Amino acid sequence: DVKVTQSSRYLVKRTGEKVFLECVQDMDHENMFWYRQDPGLGLRLIYFSYDVKMKEKGDIPEGYSVSREKKERFSLILESASTNQTSMYLCASSLSRPGASMRAEQYFGPGTRLTVT
Amino acid sequence: RKEVEQDPGPFNVPEGATVAFNCTYSNSASQSFFWYRQDCRKEPKLLMSVYSSGNEDGRFTAQLNRASQYISLLIRDSKLSDSATYLCVVNKYSGAGSYQLTFGKGTKLSVIP
């Protein structure tokens, strides 16, 4: 079974703090993704990575950065947390890229519910 | 048309009923289709991939209609444990040779005793 773990289930931070969210997968997947999920807006893609040291912007990258130093680990960084970044953050990984016709399904971690006060 | 559109529900059905959800997508070049389920305050979990010929997994049947650009999910003999939000997921071309998965906002199902 694919296992994706995230460093925290719940996190409370203050406005302006730098926040690190860690994600680790154990299936040797090359592709990793960060999403946020908000009521009424669904899942939105923040950043993704198809290889170590590689990163690409998703639909809503502003205010975020990422780091992929090792294949199994993909970190999301909030450089200066703001209240509008209060959300559920979900990490995912997949064997194939989203453009592939097979094995493109993504497996999610349990999520980090971040509150910025 | 929205990229992926679903009826938000809720669908309230009695145990044992058959329920069907539809999802429409806007990008005719989409190639990958999935149904995920998401329980309250949990992560989405893959329910099934959707193949061109349609596919079945136990009580669950998924169909794809490329001409009309919609995907359906049929649940037979509903169980209380089927209560969840069902997300329709489609890939889309996002430019520069890259694709993304686009998630619908989900259809909420409540199975009632």
Image: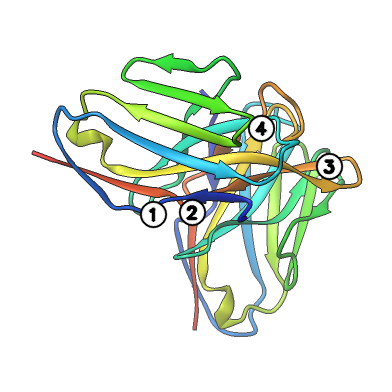
Give the left or right position of residue B63, taking residue B32 as reference: left
Q: Chain of mark 3?
A: B
Mark 4 and mark 2: span between their CA atoms? 21 Å
Q: Residue at x 46, y 24 (%)?
A: B62
Inspect the image, locate mark 1, and give the three-letter code of the amino acid beneath it: Pro
For disc 1, the marked residue is: B8
Between discs 1 and 2, the one toward the N terminus: 1
Inspect the image, locate mark 3, and give the three-letter code of the amino acid beneath it: Ser
Q: Are marks 1 and 2 in contact (CB under 8 Å)?
A: yes
Measured as percent of width and height from the top left, residue A25 is found at 62, 36
Query: Eyeballing the image, is A19 above or below A36?
Result: below
Quick one: A48 or A80, which is closer to the camera?
A48
Q: Chain of mark 1?
A: B
Same subunit, tags 3 and 4: no
Mark carried by residue A94: 4
Badge 3 density bin: few <14, some 14–19, many ≥20, Cα 10 Å: few
Measured as percent of width and height from the top left, residue A20 is found at 64, 63
Q: Are marks 2 and 3 in contact (CB under 8 Å)?
A: no
Label 4: which secondary element: strand
Inspect the image, locate mark 4, and give the three-letter code of the amino acid beneath it: Ser
Same subunit, tags 2 and 3: yes
Inspect the image, locate mark 2, and give the three-letter code of the amino acid beneath it: Lys
Badge 4 density bin: few <14, some 14–19, many ≥20, Cα 10 Å: many
For disc 3, the marked residue is: B98
For disc 2, the marked residue is: B105
Instruction: Count how many numbered circles sit on residues in the image.
Output: 4
